Amino acid sequence: MKNKHIAIVTLLSILLFSLLTCLAIAGADSGNTNEGGEITCIIADSTGDWGYPSPHGHYPRGPGYVRMSLVFDTLVWKDKQGFVPALATDWEYIEDENAYLFHLREGVTWHDGEKFTADDVAFTFNYVKEHPSWWVDLKSLKQAEILDEYTVKIYLEERYAPFLNSDAGGLAILPKHVWQDVEDPAEFKEPESLIGTGPFKLVDYSKTHGTYLYEANKDYYLGKTNIDNLKFVKISEEMASTALMRNEVFATAIPPETVAEVRENGFVIINQSGNWNAKLMINHEKEPMSSKEFRHALAYAINRTELVEIAQRGHAIQGSPGLLSPTSPYYNPEIINYEYDPERAKDILESMGYGHNGEILELELITAPRMGFERVAEIIARQLEAVGIKVNIRSLESKTLDYRVMNQQFDLAISGHGGIGGDPAILNKVILGNFGYSANYTKNDTLNQLLEAHLHEMDQEKRQAIVREIQGVYAEELPALTLYYPTWYWGHDGSVDIYYTMGGIASGIPIPLNKLAFMEYKGNAEVPAATEAPVPGFGLLISILALTGVAYLVIRRRND
């Protein structure tokens, strides 16, 4: 009898131990440490795919550049405070020669073990001048001269104010031995195209699933990162906060309405405003949008205050028709603002033959199902219909929307971009450029001249004056209307102290995923476990223990 009791107790103990072991493994799967003891930081992204993360292969938006920057380094970089050394240890501008002298870091190797030298730097500058990207266009480059194995001098054709920020700080340095025979960099997607000097190496990329997996570069010149793997996964905006609070991801952008709950659950919240703008794109090549007066009428008809209060629930700054936000040191408050005035909008439209007894105007407004843009479209449609413009809303996938805007296949569109908190060189790209979020507007000679002039003005005060004048002319021409500057919120578990980079990553990307942050993994001991949710399998454990206990009592009673 006693042996039977002992056997039952032993069986019960084994069962309990097995279940607890399974629970421990299940719990580890949602954390930062895998079964091999490696630390993996998982980041949620609502879009997922941002293109192949080579310098010329990724999608030309901020997240695409960030994915690439984990693999490739630049001469200089930025952190919380400003410029810091990267592949160059120090640099200086030689005014008499209009040249930048860079002393390069010794002992750096490419991911394939080859030595990094000045030859790679000179090659990269010459190669990218011939094959420009959205991020770097080296029109100002005269020549790159190699002084010795670790010193290079970059001569410019003319003075170029954004050089350190946009070129030296944004140009991914390429290994000459890999790229020297590549004729079409955008199509070069072989494994060797991802050989860089950066802190991470790409292990896996799925365009279909929108996932990226990186492993740490153990030979990184600043030291190995304190995490072993970095992973990006596609999770919808609606589920991002929940995934964070369940410890399924370590960091994610979160909707404003979830900030309080996420913070109450012990997670760190960071935020930023003014470096990203949502705007109404206007097809100024098509009647009646080609008329400046008609574009003015649109601006008077749109209540941007309502967009901030309702569509953004107050988590935004009202947009300036000059594009730059009030948080920018270059901001000009003394420009036409187009305060909400629907009656004035009606008057302009009637003078053009629309409204009342005039022609009924019908326009298509395209948008994308992200960042609340569909709600913004609904409000704008209602506001425009109030002044006599019928609006048909069509929601498209983001890349399709960008394509249609770029190819002038639209009437109105809601889009947006970052970079406006960095160097004002962004103005040249988003006003003159032909991208899915650029105005592609070159019709005003004065504006064109001002945009060219500020690039070459080395005196900071004079450059600020030119940029303020640019905003005034742009607001008058109004090729696009900035609606608001959203406040971005990110939540994270505290294991990596992510931050918003001073002036934005590279040329101004307002994403708090600076690769330098991953050099200091602190662990998540201070972050509370998600104990408010049921522990996986805990109910099953209790049920089995209860049934086993009942069985034991039944057997004991029968034997007694």
Image: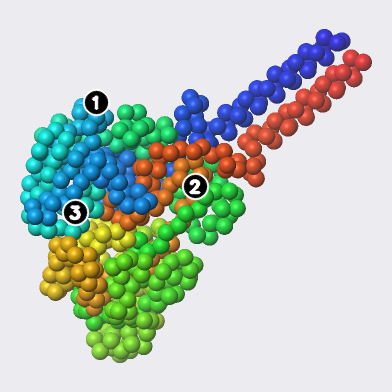
Q: Residue at label 2?
A: 492
Where is residue 396 drawn, in percent x and y? Answer: 34, 58
Horizontal side of 408 relative to 211 (left or right) equals left
What amino acid type is highlighted by mark number 1? Gly
The earlier-in-sequence mark between 1 and 3 is 1
Give the camera-side residue of 196 and 20.
196
Q: Is 156 rendered above or below residue 189?
A: below
Q: Counting residues from the N terminus, which is met first, the one under dot 2 or under dot 3?
A: 3
Q: Give percent across and percent down for residue 34.
A: 49, 29
Dot 1: what SS?
loop
- Relative to 206, is 308 on the left or the right? right
Q: Residue at x 41, y 62 (%)?
A: 273
* Residue 186 visible in the current orientation: no
Q: CA distance from mark 2 to mark 3?
A: 34 Å
Amino acid type, mark 2: His
* 176 over 133 or under it: above or below: above
Residue 70 is drawn in which quadrant?
A: top left
Q: Which of label 1 and label 3 is nearer to you?
A: 3
Q: Point out residue 233 in the picture as x, y percentages from the top left corner.
A: 42, 42
Q: Mark 1 = which residue?
A: 113
Q: Secondary structure at mark 2?
A: strand
